[in-house]
Amino acid sequence: MTDIAVGIDIGGTNTVFSCVDANGKSWGNGSILTQEQERFEDFLNDLCNLMDKTIEDSSENLKLIGVGIGAPNGNFHTGTIENAANLRWKGCLEISRLVKERMNVPVKLTNDANAAALGERIFGGAKNMTDYMMITLGTGLGSGIVVNGDLLYGHDGFAGEVGHIIVRPEGRECGCGRRGCLETYVSATGVKRTVYKMLAKHLGDSPLREIPFNKLTAKMVADAANDGDLLAMEVFAYTGKMLGETLANIATVTSPKAIFFFGGLAKAGELLFEPVREAMEKNLLFLYKNKISLLPSELGDDAAVLGAAALIWNDQSRK
């Protein structure tokens, strides 16, 4: 019999899960549309039914030991999803309690960036680390901070929101309702906004001028930079500098051994890593210089579900 933990990643469009053993191997997976059901309870019922079927249909004799969930605004302390902007169900959703009652196993919940941070230690490049950070660079900027081997949650369960540090007072409008947050500059969306700011400032030729805002992607900007487009290269230099400066400030509080990067924007590689590294080292307090590694995540495209499953396997490793 093989013990498995189910890792669930709840996204705005799709909810995916995987049956993960202690070594990070998947023994089955599935997905459903997140927003199809009007009632949250019906969505969970569909999800649990599919998880049951996946476990039963496996060629291996699987034993479910727990369910880990990564979700927007997931609160580890309360086991609830609280007013997630990209979900149709509003208010406080008692997901951990409902899934535990249905599956009859322990259930742990956190947000997707925290889950990815924990997954990096259980299954990825942070296996021997007790102090590190995970930065997820997608549509927004998420972060998970591990201190002394534990995720940093704060008293209310929502600590560690690096993406919402204000880096430009009265700067760009953010979806959180404030202005000048880091993720409005350092994210796939932020890169797009920077492109159009620089297009307005410069008169030079660039292939990016021909692309409407709603069609532009961060990958297009990276491709243009790799092809030698000066404007696109300036965009990544600007983005990396802002992130590096912010990480230098955060390092004075957490002193991480490494900072891992995951997500679509992180796939730009050295286009992003080089200016981040340069700006961070330039602005670090002397005590921390040349001590912090900037590394790509080793979790690959399964980071979300591996991270969610790691919520369960982390508890097992401490027993």
Image (cartoon, helix red, strand yellow):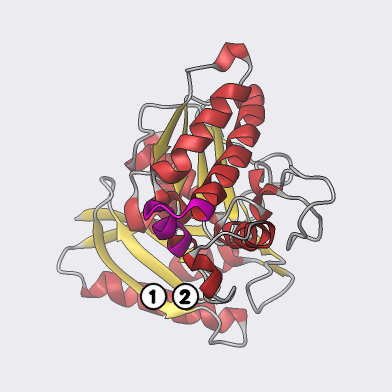
Foreground pick, 247 / 28: 247
Circle 1 residues within 10 Å: few <14, some 14–19, many ≥20: some
* Residue 14's disc number: 2
Residue at (46%, 82%) from the top-left corner? 46
Q: Where is residue 304 in the image (x, y as percent from the top left)?
A: 43, 57
- The residue furthest top is 287
- Secondary structure beneath label 1: strand
- Relative vertical location of residue 192 with respect to residue 127 in this rendering, above or below: below
Residue displayed at 58% across by 79% down: 41
The amino acid at mark 1 is Ser
Please tell me which residue is depicted at 56% across the width and 51% down the height of the picture.
235
Q: Which of marks 2 and 1 is in front?
A: 2
Residue 268 placed where, x, y %? 41, 51
Near mark 2 (Cα within 10 A), the count class, few <14, some 14-19 or many ≥20, is few
Residue 4 is one of the magenta-drawn residues? no
| Quadrant of the drawing holding the C terminus | top left
Is residue 16 shown to the viewer in this render?
Answer: yes
The secondary structure that most of the magenta stretch takes on is helix
* Residue 208 spot, x, y in % from top left: 51, 66
Vertically, is 24 above or below 129?
Answer: below
Check if mark 2's residue and mark 1's residue have beta carbons within 8 Å.
yes
* Part of the protein shown in magenta: 220-231
Q: Which mark is residue 31?
A: 1
Percent x, y for residue 180?
A: 76, 50
Q: In this view, does 14 lie above or below 159?
A: below
- The quarter of the picture where residue 122 lies is top left
In percent of the image, x 31 and y 77: which residue is there? 53
Q: Tell which residue pokes out farthest to the front in this image.
A: 204
In the image, what residue type sits under mark 2? Asn
Question: Along the polypeptide, which appears first: circle 2 or circle 1?
Answer: 2
From where the camera sits, is residue 106 visible? no
